[in-house]
Each structure stands twice: as C-alpha cells, then as structure tokens.
Image (cartoon, rainbow, N blue to C red):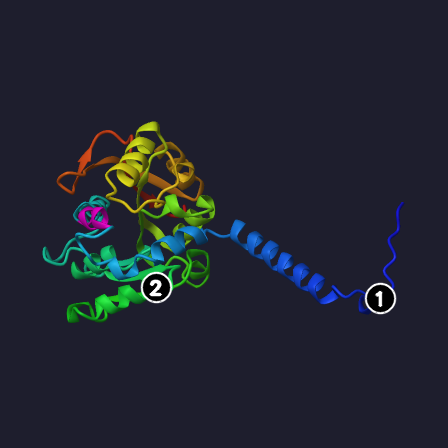
Amino acid sequence: MNIIKIRSFRSISTGPTLRNRLTEQTDQLTKSSLIKKSTVDLTDIDHFSKLHNKWWDVNGEIRPLHALNPLRIQLIRDGLANIGVKIECPYLPLEGIKILDVGCGGGLLSESLARIGADVTGIDASSELITAAKQHAVLDASLDGKLNYFQTIIEDFALNNKEVYNAVVASEVIEHVNNKELFLKCCISSLKPGGSIFLTTINKTLPSWLGGIIAAERILKVVPKGTHDWNKFVTPTEMQSLLETYGCKTKLIHGMFYNILKNEWSWMASTAINYAIHAVKKKEQK
C-alpha cells in the first residue's frame, strides 16, 4: 500500500484553492444527485424561462401552444362529463371542480379552465413564468378567486396536497421532465380517488422525430429550437403502463394533429406523433 504523507495544509500554498475545488466538486455532486431524484430538468426550465415575455403573444414563438388550447379544454371538459361529472351550468361546465395544472408555464391553460368555472391551481418550476402568469391573470377581474399560482415542483407540492384535486392536468410537460415515474406518482397522489388525470405529449417514433423536431424546430421554425429531446418522449403504451402502476385506469388515448400552415389542432386516430390520454384514479375497495 502506498501512503502519501501531508505534513500540514499550511505548508501547501494551494491549500485554499484545493479546498475550494473540493467544495465545488461536492456541490456539483450533491446538485447532480438531487436532480436525478427530481423531476426537474434545469436546461428545459431555463429554455422556457427565456420565453416569459413572449408567452402571451398569440403569433409568437409558442403559437402552437395557444392554438392547442381549444382541444385541451375539450379533452378535459368532455372527459369529466364522460365519467359522470354533472354540468349544472352550460356556460360554466367546470364549476366546483378543483384542478391542478402541473407545469402551467405562463398560464395559458390555467386561465382558460378558470374562465369556464374551475378552481385552478397552477404550478411551475420557473419563477419567471409564474410571474408572467400572475401578471396576465390580474388583467381579467373575473379570474379573481378562481386562480392561484405557485412557483414549485410537483414532488414538493404533492407532499402537502394529497388527494385534494378532482383533476390534474399536465399538458406538454412530461416530455420535459427527468423522472417520469416520480412525476406521475406525485401528480396522481394529489388526485382524489375517482379523479382524472389528463396528459398531452409526444410519442417516441420516427415520425415524431421528423415532424416534431426536424420539421417544427429546424426547418419551419414554428417551435423554438431546442424545445424537445426525442430521447425523453414516451409512447402511449409506456404511459398507460406507468399510470396503471400508480393506480389509474386509462379511459381514452387519442391522437392529435397539428396543421402547421393553418396553425390549427384537430383530433385524429393515429398517435404516431402527438397524443392525449385521460385516466381515472381507482377508488379503494372497501
């Protein structure tokens, strides 16, 4: 065994530098360890945070997300109606429904849900996007008392919000997280038994790579470059399996089509690129 003797840190002129480097390395390792156990992808958070001033520009860099809103509202409204949620007022079909919008960004979907009656809580890891969401919400007095935003991550939020919500929505989010299993587990833990989870995302296929990344980001540039990582996409089968693992039964899987030229979304049978999924949390057997 080789033994290296160091008489004293004082006799080594690089002592403080060495200690600083060791501290930096320790911090990096700790940070890396936390990220691996977290849902947060810091690169993606930074990417979307830079768009906070453009989030509500309907003709801007995230116009496909604006265009997707009507389809997302229909998915949630009809999905809840199909499992027996009664609509008392046609103009406020989600009145009395508590919804958690995970990864709410600047609040596009959250605001729309609140306007049709839902009591909405939006959470996002980006402080810039939460600020943008709050600033936009105050422009509409009708949203007062119906909409709350918090800058947090789902694994922290879920700790104190177990079985609180009638529905949890994560739209165009799961393809950006590091730990899909933990993400879904925490989302579902916030659901009441019998509650619904709604997800929209991108399939992991060759067409999704060609259409969602090559065409959308690099050729047509309708989506900011670097928005998506194909390796993080998830197939409907994998998604359904994960939902089942955490106690949810899938009710619907439907394909979605984006017409880039018209900036319009529509339903389609194929799930080769974009798809939506609705699942319901099973009630405990008595």
Dominant secondary structure of the residues highlighted in magenta in the image? helix
| Quarter-of-image position of residue 5 | bottom right
Q: Is residue 252 visible?
A: no
Q: Position of residue 37 (x, y in %)?
A: 53, 51
* Residue drawn at 58 percent across, 52 percent down: 33
Q: Can you tell which mark lies on residue 128?
A: 2
Q: Is residue 174 visible?
A: yes
| Quarter-of-image position of residue 131 | bottom left
Secondary element type, mark 1: loop
Q: Is residue 108 above or below residue 278?
A: below
Mark 1 sits on what residue?
8
Q: Position of residue 189 (x, y in %)?
A: 42, 53
Which region is colored magenta?
62-69
Residue 142 falls left or right of residue 83: left
Q: Position of residue 178 (x, y in %)?
A: 46, 47
Asked if residue 217 lies in the magenta stretch, the reply is no
Density class for disc 1 (Cα within 10 Å; few <14, some 14-19, many ≥20) is few
* Residue drawn at 40 percent across, 51 percent down: 44
